Amino acid sequence: MAHEITVPRLGWSMEEGVLGDWLKASGERVQAGEPLFTLEGEKAAQDIAALDAGILCLPADAPRTGDTVKVGQVIGFLLAEGEEAPALVGKQASTPAVAAPSSARLSRPAGPAARRLARQLGVDLDAVPTPDPTGRVVCEDVRRASAHRRFNSASATQSIASPRARRRAKELGIDWTSLTGTGRGNRIRESDVLGHRQLAKPVAPPASAPLFPGKHVRASKLRAIIAQRMVAGVTQAAPVTLVTKVDAEPLVAYRNGLKQAAPDGRSPSYNDILLLLVSRTLREQPQLNACWDRDGIHTYDDIHIAIAVDTDSGLLAPVIRHVDQLTLEQITARSGQFIAEARSGRLCQDDLEGGTFTITNLGMFGINTFTPILNLPQAGILGIGRIVEEPIVRAGQVVSGHTLSLSLTFDHRVMDGAPAARWLQSLCQKCVELPNPLKT
């Protein structure tokens, strides 16, 4: 029987993507695990691997390179030897999806055992609830979902809805149990809820012409994703921003010392040094290395810091993992690599996921302070302003010195103002206590 090739979900909020090149030709034999096609997700492109072997079949109505495809959409088939090829991708097969990211090979992260068990029990991994905040599905989650489905099947009138559909229905005030689902096994999807809202809304009159002449440009896919994330960071959390100014004289002396001591003239940036200090502060005070999850606080064991990078396409935030275990030289090398890859469009989706805290720097643009927006589900983001040479008071004397402004936005659901202020105070103290490399 033909195995469907479907579009996987590359990111937690991804609903659609752009189909890239097919890496195998129609009629060519494909081995399980071989890269099959490229898919552009929310902010990066990724090779997608086949989970089964077979002969690639791309019917006449299969989407082409550059087409927008939705998560779960059938885009082709893998056939057994001698098996008749389906005429259209609209002809649905009964087997589950066989394509997923080459790194995870699933729309939801899950191990091989959980994936195999889901196939055996006919469980849709996208609909399996899991207590893991990363969304990873284990065998116990699959068994629990299968038992729950068998229990619910006793009532033919009871509807099944995905978690996203339930949340969206609650936001819009829609009774999802009254809807008809279009998903597998009549499962109600988010698109069913949105479709019901569109049908229920009155037809709006045509939009009038703008008051003033101008040019309207449709948002790019990346711009739309950034807009969605920014709105979520304000509306789905309780953001509060604290601003402080720190004596940056030790920080400036520390970096100047590193520059003089560097044999090749290459030295860490201020951002790299602050990455190191932030990781140490998060290790000592981990309350901000956390997220709000299932009406509770989940504190991460590891420290993975995302760094905001300005690119021609838009804002990207690659993640440097286990920062607290790296030396300053290693941090400098990895941040430099990520910045170069972000600006050349060579980041993959895995590079943009898994962050537990974010740093964003606008100091190079002459900005003193600003209000960073949370990078959900993270509970904290640090904004770095410019280093300013100005008069400061030391030992009762007004002298010329350097100051640095820091802006910390935190989720008030996870932490109160006083602990957040102490966290920021501890970071500032680390900046002041930096040694001069030339004297140590």
Image (spheres, rainbow, N blue to C red):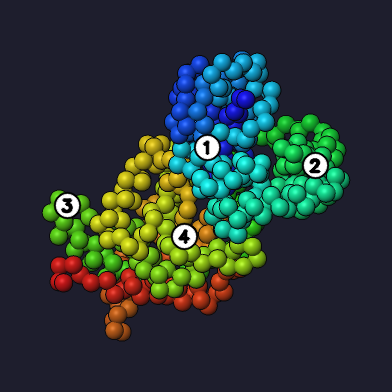
Asked if residue 413 can be seen in this view, the reply is yes
Name the amino acid type tagged 2: Arg
* Vertical side of 220 occupied by 160: above or below: below
Name the amino acid type tagged 1: Ala
Bin the neighbour count of mark 3 within 10 Å (Cα to Cα): few under 14, some 14-19, many 20 and up: few
Q: Closer to the observer: label 1 or label 3?
A: 1
Write the residue at 53% across / 18% down: 81
Q: Closer to the observer: label 2 or label 3?
A: 2
Bin the neighbour count of mark 2 within 10 Å (Cα to Cα): few under 14, some 14-19, many 20 and up: some
Residue at the farthest left position:
263
* Circle 2: element type: helix
Kindly identify which residue carries mark 3: 265
Kindly identify which residue carries mark 1: 100
Q: Sequence-wise, which precedes: disc 2 or disc 3? A: 2
Bin the neighbour count of mark 4 within 10 Å (Cα to Cα): few under 14, some 14-19, many 20 and up: many
Q: Position of residue 351 (x, y in %)?
A: 42, 46
Asked if residue 21 can be seen in this view, the reply is no
Q: Sequence-wise, which precedes: disc 4 or disc 2? A: 2
Name the amino acid type tagged 3: Gly
Name the amino acid type tagged 4: Phe
Kindly identify which residue carries mark 2: 197
Q: Which mark is residue 357?
A: 4
